[in-house]
Image (tube, grey):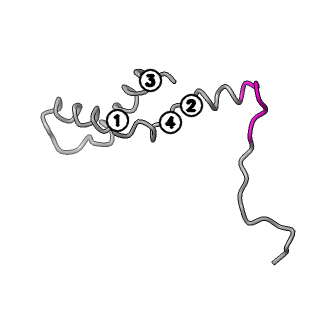
Amino acid sequence: MNSGSSVYATTAVPPPGSEAEKEMKAAFEASHHHAEIAQEAYLLWLNRGCADGGDFQDWLSAIEIVRQRNPE
């Protein structure tokens, strides 16, 4: 093993004030809203009559509902 090499991946950080930094900060983090998304998905499922299937679409729809509610 080369002692000068790193085994860790690095992530590029955009320069402060750049358009890339603004976009990164504006990105919606669904993981920060998991409980809210789960609640919305559950309500969508109830509105569909508790039918089997469609859970993935309910989840995606719930993410969009929560995203619109929390523009961050």
- Earlier sequence position, callout 3 versus callout 4: 4
Query: Residue under circle 1?
Result: 37
Q: Mark 2 and mark 1 in contact (Cβ < 8 Å)? A: no
Residue range in magenta is 13-20
The residue type indicated by label 3 comes to Asn
Q: Secondary structure at mark 3?
A: loop
- Gap between marks 1 and 2, in whole Å? 16 Å
- Gap between marks 1 and 3, in whole Å? 11 Å
Query: Residue under circle 2?
Result: 27
- Earlier sequence position, callout 1 versus callout 2: 2
Looking at the rendering, which quadrant does residue 21 occupy? Answer: top right
Our reading of the magenta stretch's main secondary structure is loop
Q: Which residue lies at the image location 74% right of the left edge and 66% below the top edge? A: 7
Q: Please give left or right for residue 29 compared with residue 13 in the image.
A: left
Q: Residue furthest left?
A: 49
Q: Residue furthest bottom?
A: 1
Residue 45 at x, y = what percent? 21, 36
Residue 70 at x, y = what percent? 44, 23
The residue type indicated by label 4 comes to Glu
Q: Please give left or right for residue 17 compared with residue 27 in the image.
A: right
Query: Residue under circle 4?
Result: 29
- Earlier sequence position, callout 1 versus callout 4: 4
Looking at the rendering, which quadrant does residue 1 occupy? Answer: bottom right
